[in-house]
Amino acid sequence: MIEIKKLSAGYRGVPVLRDLTLSFPTGKISTLIGPNGCGKSTLLKTMCALLPSISGELFFDGKPLSAFHRREFARLCAVLPQSRNIPALRAMELVAHGRYPHLSFSRNLREEDWKKVAAAMEKTGTLPLKDRLLSSLSGGERQRVYLAMTLAQDTPVLFLDEPTTYLDIGQKYEILELVKFIRDEGKTIVMVLHDLPLAFSYSDEITVLAEGRALCQGPSARVFEERIADRVFGVSSRQVTVEGKTEYLFFRAT
Amino acid sequence: MSISRKSSTRSFFRKDLQGLKLCLLALFLLLCTLLGLWGGSTKLSLFETCLSVLRGDSSSPQARILLYVRLPRVSASLLSGAALAASGVLIQAVLQNPMAAPNVIGVNAGAGFFTFLTLALFPAHLAFAPLGAFAGALLAALLVYGAASIAGAGKLTIILAGVAISSMFTAGINFIKTISPESLYNGSSFLIGGFSGVSFRDLFPAFWLILISLLLSLLFSSHADLLRLGDDSAQSLGINVKLCRFTLLLLACLLAGSAVSFSGLLGFVGLIVPHIARRLFGVSHRILLPASALFGAALVTLCDLLSRLLFAPYEIPVGILLSLLGGPFFLFLLLKRPRGRREGDPR
């Protein structure tokens, strides 16, 4: 369980988020949604300690963030950041970087580290790409390789910042199915998504942010029924059942 | 899991090959060193001279040349080559910019300016030169780094800021040279970079600084690897990105500053050697750093030898030769690079 208490956060002392109190349950997919500039990426960055908070505190299973050592925190939370470099590395070499927080002083990967790397690549279907240069991969493949790196980090908590940007619709589903699969293994996932239909169909919990405040947090079905996203984005929505599955439609409000 | 086993043996195999290549490079360096000791306007019969020196007889002219001319000179070329090349690798890692190098971003010019300044102000204290050089190198690096982080650290911004700072310090050097020409016994060769007249006394403090910085930078090689992933990823893997950048930059300045203090503004090594080494050894800093250091040492020693041999008994400053040979070679590398690949891809 990740708890946020009276958190203010932002850049260079100017708060984007004000006085937030939220909690994210263990073993679930929690998604932050909201219009551009509402502070969802800021919140995610603050939660994964990439950005220092201005006031307030974050707790991971009751332990405050400030009590964590860097490497200890890196063994608890892995992050897929929004902007990613494309270093001149082969896929497997990149994934191996995920083992860094677990390595001893000599920084050599042991046999079991390589096993974890291979397992993470197998899970994300990137094992056939292991000797390819990152620059030669497609956007979707590269995304999965980066996800494999965060999985190789072998943490109970995963933060994903816009994991589906730049991907086509098929690749988006592929990534989110993978996220679901990871959740079913017991990991806690907190992510930011732009795509509302995908956010509602794949999340257990939804948090709606607007202008630096949280409007609501709860199970995605309930948040949908309360039409909060409709109000925030100025759209209308329908829930339809296609082949026994609930899908969400968003369209322009009339 | 069969797949993982296969991949791990593969990576070990690759490592072995890297080790072998590194050994070959070390052998090449040894050869260059011996050639450097041998060659010049007077050719030494190395074996006999060494024997006589070891027997305690260093009075023959041959032995005196070996001990007081060749040995300091080759040591200087080895040290400065290794230091500048390693400094180039570190600066390229810190700034994440393949165009960066100690001479490009003004570190060399800063070091040179402060070396001049200390020599002009305290002519009696040669030992201050490396310290002044280090201070100058650090000042230049911090200026570039600061300017880039204020203006948004675009790759071009860093280079342009470096060019501006470099030209400021070069102007400073020329200013001192103009108003106090007697403060330097060989001012013009300092600007180009060269080793004529170098003695062990000039090398002594720089030697330790370079050795320690090289070892420390090896310790931080895996941190340098992580910087490649971008700040956010590196930080979420548990390193303090800002501290790591600063430490690596500090080491790069120590290396370049120490080298400049006795070799002058030897420019091109720090830019081209990391690129060549990356072609041969890949991008992992644990291999790349020692490989660049060895290669830089070998290259500068070889060029210094040529600079003595080509127009013997006259000699040209090694900096001229390095630029003459290095420039076309670097262009060749750029043109040969397969299209659609990024900087620093291994083959």
Image (spheres, coloured by chain):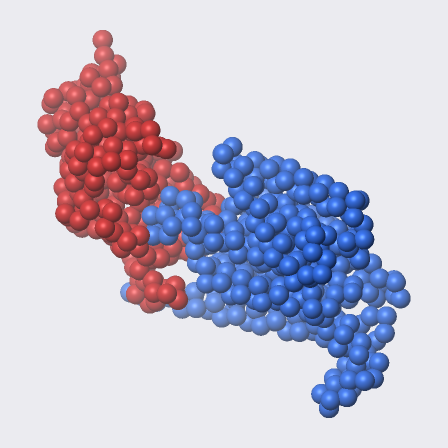
Quadrant of the rendered image containing residue A218: top left
Res. B206 visible in picture: yes
Res. A121 visible in picture: no
The x and y percentages for residue A181 are 21, 46
Answer left or right for B222 relative to A211: right
Q: Is residue A137 above or below residue A8?
A: below
- Residue at image coords 56%, 41%: B143
Task: Please state which of residues B52 and B95 is positioned toward the viewer in this rendering.
Answer: B52
Quarter of the figure that contains the C terminus of chain A? top left
Quarter of the figure that contains the N terminus of chain A? top left
Can you tell which chain is drawn blue?
A: B
Q: Is residue A64 above or below residue B125?
A: above
The x and y percentages for residue B106 are 63, 45
The x and y percentages for residue A68 are 25, 51
Q: How many marks?
A: 0
Q: Is residue B15 above or below residue A251?
A: below
Q: Is residue B304 above or below residue B118?
A: below
Task: Please state which of residues B261 and B237 is positioned toward the viewer in this rendering.
Answer: B261
- Residue at image coords 64%, 47%: B110
Answer left or right for A82 relative to A210: right
- Residue at image coords 35%, 57%: A100
Quadrant of the rendered image containing residue B320: bottom right
Answer left or right for B338 relative to A202: right
The x and y percentages for residue B233 are 37, 46
Can you tell which chain is drawn red?
A: A
Task: Please state which of residues B300 and A123 is positioned toward the viewer in this rendering.
Answer: B300
- Residue at image coords 80%, 76%: B65
Task: Please state which of residues B53 and A173 is positioned toward the viewer in this rendering.
Answer: B53
